[in-house]
Amino acid sequence: MEGRGYLLLIIICIFGPVTMALGQITYFEQGFDGAGPYANTPPNIGQFDKLVQTNTSSYAAFNGALELTRAQNPVPQNTSGLVRAVRSTAFSPNPETLYIQMTLSARDISTVTSNAVYFYVGENFNPDNNSIPSNLLLFSRISLNFDGIGVVVRDLQTNVNSAPIGPNTSFTLTWVLNNSAWGQVYKFPETAPVANYKVMPYRYDLWVNGLLLVDEASAYPPPGSVVPNSYSPTRLSNFEIRYRDGFGTIGIDYLLIRDIDGVLPIYISSFEATQFQEQVRLEWTVPLQENMPDTYLVQRSVDGYDFTTIGTVPGQGSIGYQYIDSIRVGGRFFYRIMALDIQGRVIETTLRRTLFLDPAEDLIFVYDNPVKAGVLQVYDGGMGQDFRLRNVSGIEIPFTSWRGVGGELLIDPIRPLPAGIYLLGLHYRGKNRSLRVAVP
């Protein structure tokens, strides 16, 4: 298209048919607000197999949390020990997927330490051996780095770090792991009306509060490693928390381990949208399988909530499909495919975003706006500089910022923003710009 460029944000939802939804299985749930005990052999649904403390390291149930503390041992040095919370009795029935959610906080952190606290998911963990689990036993591992006063969440597979989290600040980790042969879908947040995120086979997602820190990382260690993991059906059967370095206290307020609610196979394996001229080409593929979809509905929305059917494509047993949307205006659009079986049944499976930015256009925006998760997501094509956030009185709001996996700038205010209107200023393509941001 000549003479006119436009910004196109496409959010893609994929739907596929299913005959049965599975019930949710909870493997572990504990709020640490009772009398305990929190470890036993064999463990119940709210217990570890073993809580381990050595030297000057300790654990205690206090103020509704399981507190793990590592104190410096002055004589001899470097003998402060460790704290472990180990669930080595295999989860039953054996999970193919896990949805792990932890709410925790850092207290009295006094050192700068990398990988101070580890979280492991794997198999055949030994509660009586304090050696680090072999990589060949692991599906995934994440850690907490200490920055002297607070913590940073680190994914060890991708080396991606979260923004710093201050002391005594409660935060939630959500870890979604898939060891099955099918792509799986899940709700995030759990209050979402439909499943809106996916995780493909032998991969995992990691969320810090409401932000997707890691999107579909490979199970650890990845293919191509010197000693790559072979597939094991029980690779999600054990869990461990290990506090092994640095000094201070980590409080675990809540821990939930369950399978992915309503696990369903993804019957549409890929969905791509590309802009060309004044059209959008939608292409999707469907693996050959039993009960192939009978019909595909192509739908479009301008807000991601109210969708209109713009076309119908018959399901003819093919593996590749295409639809051309001859759209005549620029802006932000959302697309989804609904796959219907012969009885007209449909089930939602996954959601993902793709950002298309035409370099000829001079558009930037904040998504979502109003801001829903406390963190501003600014889509600027990576070209914005000198960001400043102010309230309507002109008072500057301090924040931390970093680039997300899609190139968007994530702005996290140091303190939660009261409801109101804010102005986000930036330098963009040689101009000073200002965006209005609403906080409900």
Image (tube, helix red, strand yellow):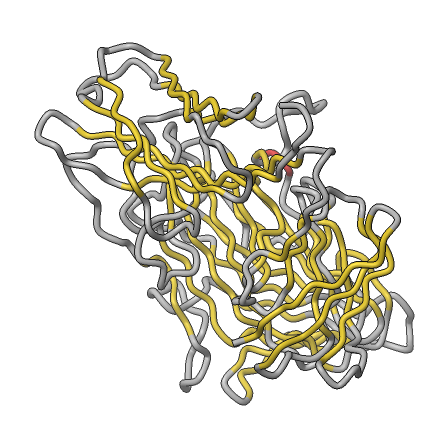
Instruction: Residue 42: tell me if it is visible.
Output: no
Residue drawn 79% across the image and 66% down it:
146
Return the x and y of residue 360 as percentages of the image width and height. 73, 34
Residue drawn 45% across the image and 43% down it:
236
> In the displayed structure, would residue 130 be above or below residue 50?
above
Residue furthest to the bottom: 63
- The N terminus sits in image quarter: top right
In this rendered view, identify the residue nearer to me: 409 or 379. 379
State the image quarter where residue 211 is shown.
bottom right
Instruction: Residue 233: tell me if it is visible.
Output: yes
Return the x and y of residue 23 as percentages of the image width and height. 21, 51
Residue drawn 63% across the image and 25% down it:
228
Return the x and y of residue 294 as percentages of the image width and height. 18, 21
State the image quarter where residue 367 is shown.
bottom right
Return the x and y of residue 415 as percentages of the image width and height. 70, 80
Q: Is residue 159 left or right of residue 336?
A: right
Q: Is residue 215 left or right of residue 391?
A: left
> In the displayed structure, would residue 344 be above or below residue 244?
above
In this rendered view, identify the residue nearer to me: 342 or 107. 342
